[in-house]
Image (cartoon, rainbow, N blue to C red):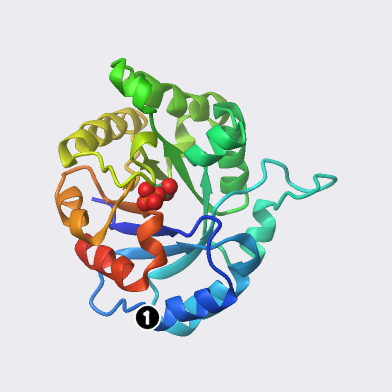
Amino acid sequence: MPNPLVVANWKMNGDRAFAGAFFSALDLSGVVADVAICPPFPYLMQVVESAGKMGSGKLSVGAQNVSAEEAGAFTGEVSADMLGDCGARYAIVGHSERRTLYGESSELVAKKFAAAKGAGLVPIICVGETLEEREAGRTLDVISAQLQAVVDHAGAESWRGVVVAYEPVWAIGTGKTATPEQAQEVHRFIRERLGEAGVETPLLYGGSVKGSNAAALFAQQDIDGALVGGASLDAKEFTGICRAAG
Ligand code: PGA
């Protein structure tokens, strides 16, 4: 069983003062799970420093996005090497907000995934279906295609040493969580798909995870942790989720 992992995705929220206050209120005593904080880019180094000061080997930092390119004339982009250089361990790729609001295709997500891996980062690749796709009974097909894009670009071997997050689009930021059974069904499917490649990676659930629903989700056999948006902006609430993970 992979070690539980709880990831905070602050999205485009917070400022320097928020980041400072967050770490003052975060209490990881007794937490068994690995924990990662993904702030907006400008606060990455501040958060790396704060996480280092907490002196917990379990706490690391990630980026919310990464360029598919290595270096060069790509205005506004941030490379995987730069993220590693700033102390990041993880990079989220393929978040549904990037796929839908910024038109990132599964092919581009696969390139970002490979770029992150190539630079020694751990990609956290997000997959998930829309409500329309779920209601049409296409959930597993959609997830399958999103996973296949990575295999096509980087090969099945590339699943080793990564994290996969299942985030149903209809559950993100809506307060509407997938039931533990709905999440488990998809996690089992992903586990089996990756298992065909002989790989066991941590599988996170994301979508309106809070202190009050985390334990029921983590009780499912194939849910190894969470990718937390809104509730990660409240250090106490986030601490509760980390505790629930183990
Ligand atoms: P949420 O976001 O917890 O606010 O639903 C999760 C995510 O987008 O990663």
Which one is nearer the viewer's eye here, 133 or 202? 133
Q: Which residue in the rendered view is the most extreme toward the top?
A: 136
Side (left or right) of 90 relative to 42: left
Residue pictured at 22% horizontal, 55% vertical:
214
Element type at mark 1? helix
Ligand 1 is within 8 Å of the C-beta of the residue at disc 1: no
Residue 211 lies in quadrant:
bottom left
Where is residue 195, by image quadrant? top left
> Where residue 5 sits in the image (x, y, percent)?
33, 58
Give amino acid for label 1: Ala
Q: What residue does disc 1 label?
A: 25
* Mark 1 surroundings within 10 Å by alpha-carbon count, few (fewer than 14), some (14 through 19), many (20 or more): few
Is residue 75 among what the camera can see? yes
Q: Tell whether 245 sits left or right of 151.
A: left
User: Most extreme residue toward the front, as rendered?
Assistant: 174
Residue 202 placement, left or right of 153 = left
Identify the residue shown where x is 32% and y is 52%.
226
Residue 45 position, x and y percent, is 61, 72
Q: Residue at x 31, y 32 (%)?
A: 190
Q: Is residue 204 among the parts visible in the rendering?
A: no
Q: Indicate the position of residue 161 as horizontal and vertical percent values.
A: 43, 48
Q: Residue at 29% across / 20% down in the picture? A: 135
Quarter of the image with the C terminus is bottom left
The answer to which image quadrant residue 131 occupies is: top left
